[in-house]
């Protein structure tokens, strides 16, 4: 693969390819200076770290582990990568697949309470930044053997029997969500995937394929940052210190779980303020609330209590729950910390809910009112 030079010679096309890739990544930096983006040193530093993570995410997702003939289940949020309000209670797994092949997912169920399998088409590497669903299988509907093992056929044609995860023309991604209520006690599902119909995996790297993947990775980085920065700015304008359901179709077309109702918000508190999040959860499989930074990354849940769920929250006697978001602990059992942030985004999600509310109630109060038990 050579291209002509001005002096009549030639040079490897990889030179121009690398320049094009770097130019795209360079262009992503403009999102740190968009109107409405916080420009203080702390949030800008987090923004820079976020950009480096999205570069890694693009390369890992698009360039590495990308053979649909020999798929590998990978964790897209490993190594500190956080994207679009990633769920602290989740383990995510993805694999690159192709709709004209058939696949077999197999393994042991474990006892993680929520297990969802989905196929998608499109992706953030595409210009429309859409990742629409093409198939969905709820773990509660799995046929499981007495020893706890199971198999799933992933295909465009429904089998006569057994577990089936549909694909359609254009399907290119498998996405698995495992949602834990108590990570310390629950066993994850142990899963593997194999391609049933491809003749063989490629034995060497094709130069044209590498070129296409590298530029797709650049677009993935640029489009992912664009999408979620725009979301954060929209939440700042329209969901300031609130948690409305909003238009769920926006979240679904970006890859959301069809069994989840999402309530995205934007919060901003001074030193002496707290936000009360109050709701009577509907009948549902699971709910949780999490605190994110401006860039829609979940805060450091390994070191700080930045989220609560249906298992960890203390419930009120009437079946409702009150969560307190504040910079300091007011002595409330459901306090979640801002972890040193002055502002950010947030997310309340309900899985498998019936009659979900149009919004989650929020209220800004003085922190000392919470301490004295006067806030309501």
Image (cartoon, helix red, strand yellow):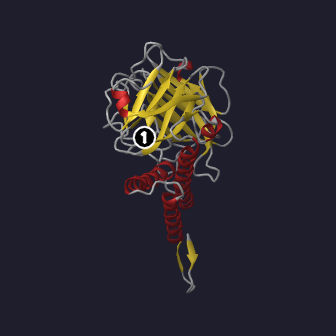
Residue 223 point in image, percent of width and height: 56, 53
In the displayed structure image, the side of residue 342 where residue 4 appears, left or right: right
Q: Quadrant of residue 147?
A: top left
Q: Is residue 366 left or right of residue 354?
A: left
Nearer-the-camera pick, 257 or 290:
290
Of residue 76 and residue 224, the one placed in the foreground of this image is 224
Q: Residue at x 40, y 45 (%)?
A: 342
| Furthest residue toward bottom | 7
Can residue 86 be seen here? The reply is yes
Q: Is residue 58 above or below residue 146?
A: below
Q: Quadrant of the N terminus?
A: bottom right
Asked whether, in this view, residue 248 is left or right of residue 305, the answer is right
The quadrant the C terminus occupies is: top left
Percent position (x, y) of residue 97? 57, 41
Whether residue 166 can be seen here: no
Q: Nearer the viewer, residue 146 or 290?
A: 290
| Residue picked out by circle 1 | 298
* Residue 166: x %, y % from top left: 64, 31
* Residue 239 falls in image quadrant: top right
Crowding at dot 1, Cα within 10 Å, few <14 / some 14-19 / many 20+, comes out as: many
Give the number of marks.
Answer: 1
Q: Position of residue 217 (x, y in %)?
A: 52, 55
Secondary structure under tag 1 reads loop
Q: Quadrant of residue 359?
A: top right
């Amino acid at each position: 693969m050579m291209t002509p030079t001005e002096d009549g010679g030639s040079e490897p096309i990889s030179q121009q390819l690398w320049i094009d890739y770097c130019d795209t990544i360079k262009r992503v930096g403009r999102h740190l200076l968009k109107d409405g983006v916080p420009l203080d040193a702390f949030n800008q530093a987090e923004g820079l770290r976020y950009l480096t993570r999205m570069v890694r995410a693009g390369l890992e997702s698009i360039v590495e582990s990308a053979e649909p003939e020999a798929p590998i289940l990978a964790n897209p949020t490993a190594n500190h990568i956080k994207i679009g309000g990633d769920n602290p209670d989740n383990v995510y797994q993805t694999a690159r697949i192709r709709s004209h092949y058939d696949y077999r997912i197999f393994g042991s169920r474990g006892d993680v309470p929520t297990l969802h399998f989905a196929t998608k088409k499109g992706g953030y590497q595409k210009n429309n930044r859409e990742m629409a669903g093409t198939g969905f299988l709820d773990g509660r509907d799995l046929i499981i053997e007495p020893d706890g093992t199971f198999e799933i056929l992933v295909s465009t044609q429904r089998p006569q029997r057994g577990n089936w995860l549909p694909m359609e023309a254009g399907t290119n991604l498998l996405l698995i969500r495992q949602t834990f209520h108590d990570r310390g006690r629950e066993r994850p599902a142990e899963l593997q995937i194999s391609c049933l119909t491809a003749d063989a995996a490629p034995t060497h790297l094709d130069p044209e394929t590498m070129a296409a993947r590298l530029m797709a990775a650049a677009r993935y980085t640029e489009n992912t940052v664009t999408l979620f920065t725009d979301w954060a700015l929209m939440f700042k304008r329209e969901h300031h210190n609130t948690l409305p359901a909003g238009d769920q179709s926006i979240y679904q077309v970006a890859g959301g779980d069809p069994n989840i109702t999402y309530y995205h918000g934007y919060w901003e508190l001074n030193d002496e303020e707290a936000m009360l999040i109050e709701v009577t959860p509907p009948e549902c499989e699971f709910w949780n609330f999490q605190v994110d930074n401006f860039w829609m990354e979940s805060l450091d849940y390994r070191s700080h209590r930045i989220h609560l769920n249906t298992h960890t929250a203390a419930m009120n006697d009437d079946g409702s729950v009150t969560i307190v978001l504040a910079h300091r602990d007011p002595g409330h059992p459901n306090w979640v910390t801002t972890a040193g942030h002055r502002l950010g985004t947030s997310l309340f999600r309900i899985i498998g809910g019936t009659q979900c509310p149009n919004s989650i109630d929020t209220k800004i109060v003085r922190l000392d009112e919470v301490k004295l038990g006067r806030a309501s």
